[in-house]
Image (cartoon, helix red, strand yellow):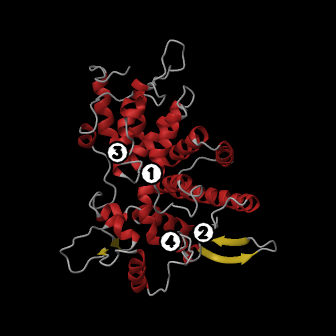
């Protein structure tokens, strides 16, 4: 059976053969390659033949100019979150000096990750973190919390659910296997976090993201460049807007540097060249003016208020629109993890004191949950033990 439709419809839709009108259609004449190609030609008004040599990703370049395509990236965010978690465990990056930065980042994910299942999975990891990775894990008397394959007892937790990682990318798929993918998904995750935090959390989120990249991103040169940008910040962030715009500016600086490197090394993606973002096509109101320097680079006078509005919409409601369409989010698009959600996904009751306090500070929505966990800590022992 072969089905035909827009890629986005396969993500968000379903096929019902009993319906007369379907966004996804059954291909009813594809018994041979030639007949199948003729059927496709009729649908798109083309004249391809079996002798044509076309790159399979020729259609990808158009996706970046369509703002609604970002809705597909919510699945890439889940993929990037799960991949980052696996890398941390595979490379044994959790050490006594790095565990605090991972806890801070998990606290942000628990409250603000765009994916509900990643919020729940992050909460499960956080609830059990002190038992599996104690603060004195680096001392000679403490065994590292690893099993035979080195991934650790934490590997029993699936941070975004059992269906992730899926092993492929959607919005972040490059035209070559070595381009885009994980780094694209991770950037979108960071941007989505930056527009979801409250004003009072902006500095906490800034330090959590900077420390996470510095300690856990696999590319040493990349994380050093990013951390240097973090160190250049001279005053704390007090507003969501300021942090979101700083991260946006940092991303553009990275792109400016990579444009030159990829041009000299030939490592760029020809279908997705690095650009200053957003383009004028995506956000005309973000530009006061656009001109060219003598060296060919762009000189942009940004309307930063409009940029922030664009970021908030693009990485906010638009990003999770597929989830909301499928009923996985509440009416306000937030649907945060509840005590009932956590109770059904973990056997543990006790949360580390530091983690509980930080969650309470990160969001008042988690205040009652944190207090409950802390009150239980004195009276109950962990139910789960690890060898």
Q: CA distance from mark 2 to mark 4?
A: 10 Å
Residue 76 percent across, percent down from the top left: 45, 56
Residue 127 percent across, percent down from the top left: 36, 32
Of pointers 1 and 2, the one earlier in the residue sequence: 1
Please rate how many residues cluster around mark 3, counting C-alpha atoms within 10 Å: few if below 14, some from 14 to 19, many from 20. Answer: some
Q: Quadrant of residue 72?
A: bottom left
Of pointers 2 and 3, the one earlier in the residue sequence: 3
Q: Is any atom of residue 262 visible in this view?
A: yes
Residue 372 percent across, percent down from the top left: 28, 32
Q: Nearer the viewer, mark 2 or mark 3?
A: 2
Of pointers 1 and 3, the one earlier in the residue sequence: 3
Q: CA distance from mark 1 to mark 4?
A: 21 Å
Please rate how many residues cluster around mark 1, counting C-alpha atoms within 10 Å: few if below 14, some from 14 to 19, many from 20. Answer: few
Farthest residue to the top: give it: 141
For the residue pair 13 and 128, the one nearer the viewer reads as 13
Indicate which disc residue 26 carries: none
Q: Nearer the viewer, mark 1 or mark 4?
A: 1
Residue at position x 56%, y 74% in the image: 54
Question: Quadrant where the C terminus lies?
Answer: top left
List the residue tagged with mark 4: 63
Q: CA distance from mark 1 to mark 2?
A: 21 Å
List the residue tagged with mark 2: 271
Helix, strand or loop at label 4? It is helix
Q: Nearer the viewer, mark 1 or mark 3?
A: 1
For the residue pair 118 and 127, the one nearer the viewer reads as 118
Left or right: residue 291 versus residue 251 is right
Helix, strand or loop at label 1? It is loop
Indicate which disc residue 167 carries: 1
Of pointers 3 and 4, the one earlier in the residue sequence: 4
Helix, strand or loop at label 2? It is loop
Of pointers 1 and 4, the one earlier in the residue sequence: 4
List the residue tagged with mark 3: 161
């Amino acid at each position: 059976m072969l089905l035909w439709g827009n890629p986005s419809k396969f993500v968000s839709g379903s096929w019902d053969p009993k319906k007369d009108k379907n966004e996804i259609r059954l291909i009813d004449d594809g018994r041979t390659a030639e007949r199948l190609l003729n059927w496709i030609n009729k649908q798109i008004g083309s004249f391809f033949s079996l002798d044509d040599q076309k790159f399979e990703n020729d259609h990808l370049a158009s996706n970046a100019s369509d703002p609604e395509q970002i809705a597909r990236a919510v699945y890439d965010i889940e993929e990037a979150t799960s991949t980052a978690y696996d890398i941390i465990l595979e490379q044994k990056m959790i050490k006594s000096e790095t565990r605090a930065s991972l806890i801070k980042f998990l606290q942000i994910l628990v409250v603000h990750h765009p994916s509900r299942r990643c919020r729940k999975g992050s909460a499960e990891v956080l609830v059990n973190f002190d038992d599996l990775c104690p603060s004195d894990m680096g001392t000679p008397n403490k065994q590292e919390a690893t099993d035979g394959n080195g991934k650790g007892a934490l590997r029993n937790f699936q941070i975004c659910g059992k269906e992730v990682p899926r092993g492929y990318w959607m919005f972040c798929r490059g035209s070559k296997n070595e381009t885009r993918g994980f780094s694209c998904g991770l950037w979108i995750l960071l941007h989505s976090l930056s527009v979801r935090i409250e004003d009072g959390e902006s500095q906490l989120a800034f330090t959590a993201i900077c420390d996470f990249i510095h300690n856990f991103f696999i590319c040493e040169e990349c994380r050093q460049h990013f951390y240097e940008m973090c160190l250049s910040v001279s005053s704390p962030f007090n507003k969501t807007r300021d942090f979101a715009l700083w991260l946006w500016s940092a991303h553009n600086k990275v792109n400016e540097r990579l444009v030159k490197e990829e041009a000299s090394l030939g490592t760029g993606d020809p279908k997705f060249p690095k650009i200053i973002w957003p383009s004028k096509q995506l956000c005309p109101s973000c530009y006061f003016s656009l001109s060219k320097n003598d060296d060919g680079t762009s000189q942009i006078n940004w309307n930063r208020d409009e940029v922030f509005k664009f970021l908030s919409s693009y990485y906010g409601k638009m990003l999770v629109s597929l989830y909301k369409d499928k009923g996985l989010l509440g009416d306000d698009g937030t649907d945060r993890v509840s005590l009932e959600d956590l109770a059904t996904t973990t056997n543990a009751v006790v949360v580390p004191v530091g983690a509980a306090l930080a969650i309470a500070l990160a969001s008042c929505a988690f205040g009652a949950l944190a207090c409950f966990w802390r009150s239980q800590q004195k009276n109950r022992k962990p139910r789960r033990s690890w060898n």
